[in-house]
Amino acid sequence: MADALRMFPRARIPYGTWGSSYFPAWQTSALAEVNIGQFAGEAMNRILGLRKVPRTELGSLVIGSTIPWHWKFWNAPLVASCLGHRVPGYHVEQACATGLQATLLAGAEIETQAHDVVGVLTFDRTSDSPVGVFPERRAHVRTQAISDVWDNFGFDPATGNAMMAAAGLTARKYGVERSEVDDVAFLRYQQYFEAKESGFLDRVLVPLDVLNVAGRPLGRIDDDFGVRKMSLGAMRAMNELDTCVTGGTQTHASDGMACLMVTTKERVADLSPRPEIDIEFVAKAESRTDPSLMPEAPAFAVRELLERTGLTMDDMAVVKNHNPFAVNDVVFRKVLDYDWAKMNRTGCPLVWGHPQGPTLTRVVIEALEEAVDLGGGYVLVFGCAAGDVGIAAVLRVS
């Protein structure tokens, strides 16, 4: 492949050095009781041990989260200490795009020769999200309290609309039919449970035990708790909360973490159990659409990416996205003329949940694992983020 189609020619993602927790729905597991930053660091240590990757290989850590957690001020160095290896690092946040942005930033760290091995660790806990109190001298209400997750989901300060309203507005703009949205969501549930029953998810998701401060068990995180099989009839019977949006055709808040490694081409053999697998960064694009039309933004980012690289959707071996609403996938079909049945063959956030920070990291991990099963090829990962933003990236597995 020509260097013109390599975003970071020096950087590689070593196969098999990744892992994710399951994503239990909010308030359904012991993750609701923990400092998620500490848990994430300890969980990455566990995952690296299982993957037989010495944590001492890490030169830096990029963490990503979107919800404040206790001692967040101390950032990546604190999380690295919880991981058990004192390295420098920093934090990145871009709503639901955080997981992909953190991975791309790690690639940039490698490309600029700042480090030879960079860890990416993303996490969030929506359970019992903190409430912040903000003094506001310029308003008649001098003090405002904001529940970080729920108030932000329910109110876009640029438009006054909730995120759900963005899905409804976009559905109306494109003339989306409720029946197609239900069909998409039903298929996504089928895809998830087929991947689960085949054992595919066991290769990327790691059961993790949660302990209290005394070291006693609080619980075991070994399932995407809250996810249950859905029939098409049940999907069709749900009441609309907004145009084409029901409880079954949107995702749910959850808790979790996901991590991976980024290194140089030369160092892959030191880290990966299968160093013959080459995973390259190809290209990235971002797009912003009009206010409250967030579900169309990812399609615009992908379109820009294809135009810039000369690739087509037919070139993609794996297509996988962050889709908080099934409307996203229908709009993608309309903009890119791409069959949504070909996407998300091993599951997606619409079904397994939405802890924000690690969502797209898990998407990336599952997409790369699927591409290896298929013998390689281009991998397209994309999604939306708060602020009517879309992000897309292409990786190549060979």
Image (tube, grey):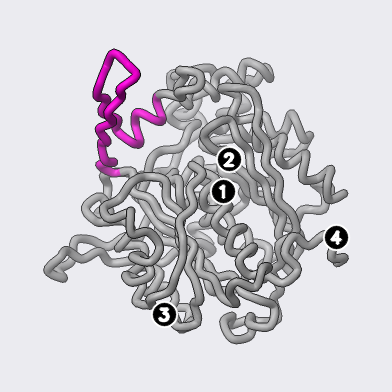
Question: Of 308 and 15, which appears nearest the observer?
Answer: 308
Task: Give how far across and how far down residue 32 sits, in percent.
Answer: 25, 50
Amino acid type of the residue that numbered disc 1 sits on in the rendered structure: Gln
Do the residues under discs 4 and 2 have CB atoms within 8 angstroms? no
**Is residue 136 shown in magenta?**
yes
Badge number at residue 49 = 3
Spatial CA distance of label 4 from label 3 is 36 Å
The residue under the point 77% across, 35% down is: 336
Q: Amino acid at mark 2?
A: Leu
Q: Crowding near pointer 3: few (<14 within 10 Å), some, many (20+)?
A: few
Label 1 to label 2, Cα distance in Å? 6 Å
What percent of the width, then of the height, locates residue 140? 29, 13
* Kind of residue indicated by mark 3: Gly
Q: Secondary structure at mark 3?
A: helix
- Mark closer to the chain start, 2 or 3: 3
Q: Which mark is residue 191?
A: 1
Which residues are drawn in magenta? 127-154
Q: Nearer the viewer, residue 71 or 54?
A: 71
Left or right of 195 in this view: 147: left
Please say if 102 is above or below 170.
Answer: below
The answer to whether the residues at label 1 and label 2 have Cβ atoms under 8 Å apart is yes
Q: Which one is earlier in the sequence, the residue at label 4 or at label 3?
A: 4
Q: Which mark is residue 187?
A: 2
Nearest the viewer among 59 and 200 is 59
Q: What's the distance in space between the residues labelled 2 and 3, CA to CA? A: 35 Å
Q: Which residue is mark 4?
A: 4
